[in-house]
Amino acid sequence: MTRTATAILGDETEAHDAVQEALISVWRELPTLREPERFDAWAGRILVNAWRHALKRRSRSRVREITLSPEPADGPGLGLRGGGGLPVENGRAESLGENDALKRAFERLDGEQRALLVLHHLEERPLAEIAAVLGIPTGTAKSRLFAARRALQRALEREWR
């Protein structure tokens, strides 16, 4: 849950808060669960509501947290930390630039597009499960995933210009 929330929200602190909020809701609402075999999708739906709430809070007041960390052994600025950052391949500076561009492009997407991409590509969940988590038909999930990929591609193209 934390990995998914961090990837979607892009901020570890917000992700931890969203997961905590979701787990409290899961605990409180557990007696209302009618189909225990669908617990994962049910809990995932609660997490989706928690990160949507976090995104709404973010739009009202935007405070950026800056994490100070010691420089890595191989020089300044070669490691990405926090916020669901992507790993740097072989410590190459050009990889850092590519990762920064991808991170900025991903941040341009709306919450649902991020969720679709994270659930499918990072969490490797099948479309039917993603649809259940998001509360939409499978065909809709498939078309929205396609649209999210296209939106990410367009955002990347803008970053590379």
Image (cartoon, helix red, strand yellow):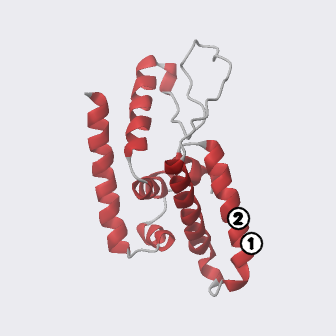
Left or right of 99 on screen, residue 54: right
Q: Position of residue 130 (x, y in %)?
A: 46, 67
Q: Position of residue 107 (x, y in %)?
A: 43, 42
CB atoms of marks 2 and 1 within 8 Å: yes
- Label 2 CA crowd tier, 10 Å (few <14, some 14–19, many 20+): some
Which residue is drawn at the image coordinates 47% and 53% (left, top)?
118
- Label 1 CA crowd tier, 10 Å (few <14, some 14–19, many 20+): few
Per the image, the residue denoted by label 2 is 23
Q: Position of residue 62 (x, y in %)?
A: 53, 42
Can you say which quadrant of the picture contains the N terminus?
A: bottom right
Residue type at mark 1 is Trp
Which residue is drawn at the image coordinates 64% and 14% (left, top)?
73
Quarter of the image for residue 94 reads top left
Quarter of the image for residue 69 reads top right
Residue type at mark 2 is Leu
Image height check: is 60 above or below 76? below
Per the image, the residue denoted by label 1 is 27
